[in-house]
Image (tube, rainbow, N blue to C red):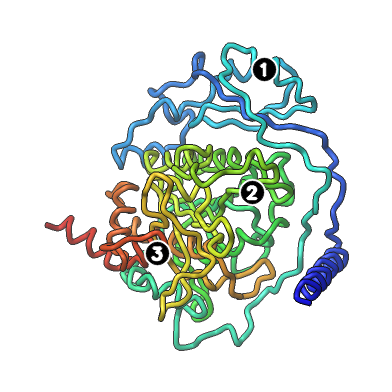
Amino acid sequence: MLRILTTLLLTLLAFSLQAAQQQDGTKRVRYKDGPAYIYRVSLTDKAGTSYSFDHPTRFLSRRAVERRKRQGLAIDSTDLPVSSHYIHLIKKEGVAIVGQSRWQNTVLVRLKDSAMVNDIRQLPCVKACKLVWLSPDSITPDKRISFQSHFEAYDSIPNDIYGTAADQIYNLKGDQLHKAGFLGKGMMIAIIDGGFKNADRIPELQKINILGWHDFVKPNDPQLFSETDHGTKVLSIMGTYHPHIFIGTAPKASYWLLRSEDQETEQEVEEDYWTMAAEFADSVGCDVINSSLGYNEYDHKWMTYQQWQLDGKTAFVSRSASMLAQKGIVLCNSAGNSGMGPWKKIGVPADADHILTVGAISDIETQRIAAFSSVGPSQDGRVKPDVVAIGAPARVISGRGVITSSMGTSFSSPVVCGLVACLWQAMRDKTAEEIMDIIRRTGNNYQHPDNIYGYGVPDFWQAFMNGTIKDEK
């Protein structure tokens, strides 16, 4: 009887989803550019590059160079762009170059015939070629949705300036940091995500200092703001400023919106797109990155990770993430939402070293871990997650322009990220590594870190006090 009821429920659910798709006009359509393949081409070196360490502003912004100088970080060979000579040799094989990573010295090539990669492999400058994307048979296109242009009267909380976002800020003592005048002014935050639906139209989000946006997914989507509203919600948690209704964790910071998540498929090439986005954030001078993205299972089993690979060094994206601190950037990355599933563990790049991996707790009173929050440690024994914050649920502004609740470490991460920017605004002489260490040390679980809470709930006011008092001595 139980099996019959389960089957009936699944059938009804599938039918209702199909009906909803038809009503929205989002049923799947044939992929127009298939078949096609994307390979990651790893190069041997950067010989023949026209760039040098003597003129870093040819490939990094002045702000990026100053960020390195302030933290005593050297510009090294990983910062140099990929050799244009090698790119020319690869293009001569008749393939399209769709991306490159200077940090990992790789090039992404798109081709119609997979046999063409054999000629690329023979080039003396090529170390390896790996298939990272196969075109799908069909896709579900996104489209614009309507949005609300104003908040409702019941959204207001007259006796609390933070409005509906109060708990997620009070829980981390972010309000005290704000009262001291640190709301992220002068700090630059990059959001690497899957889409920012209506973030360019919702009046409250248009007030945020958005410096620009960039799409790294190939082919580029001309409708970046019609994709998922996942990134819209993340942006709202940090950047919104509407007293008594909703105040974000870093409302005076400036933002770059970067799309690396392909909504059409789930394949390893997204790690390359993420890396390209992180390198862009570095090049324009961002101080902090929020990434509410994670991977472990892909559409193709041979791309999927095993738990023994969660060492921060195996996954392409984790190697990139682990480099950010040495570029002078703090990365806040969601731990993942696999705690209730068979995987349970963090994904990649949450396993990366030298970052803040953020798990989710339920509320300000009990501070219990959210059941879905992925657990650590990393495979090489590092504490993961690093810290936790409210994410079950967090208050957000959706792509429809309404204040709502959303569940996930995707939303606990930006709660932390915005306050990282505010703390760093107060202590600009600190390095990325020092900022992360100060934050971990204020966690309520710091004395006994574990694989569920990590170092616990951080206290950003205590972090400020610890950092400034130490400097005064």
The x and y percentages for residue 15 are 85, 68
Q: Are marks 2 and 3 in contact (CB under 8 Å)?
A: no
For image coordinates 23% across by 58% down, the residue present is 467
Q: Which residue is the site of mark 3?
A: 453
Quick one: 214 or 297, which is closer to the camera? 297
- The furthest residue to the front: 1
In the image, is residue 156 above or below residue 59?
A: below
Q: Nearer the viewer, mark 1 or mark 3?
A: 3
Q: Disc 2 or 1, which lies upstream in sequence?
A: 1
Q: Disc 1 or 3, which lies upstream in sequence?
A: 1
For image coordinates 22% across by 62% down, the residue present is 466
Pointer 1 local density, CA inside 10 Å: few below 14, some 14–19, many at least 20: many
Q: CA distance from mark 2 to mark 3?
A: 27 Å
Looking at the picture, which amino acid does disc 3 mark?
A: Tyr
State the quadrant of the C terminus. Answer: bottom left
Could you say whether the residue bearing mark 3 is in a helix, strand or loop?
Answer: loop
The x and y percentages for residue 315 are 52, 39
For image coordinates 56% across by 24% down, the residue present is 42
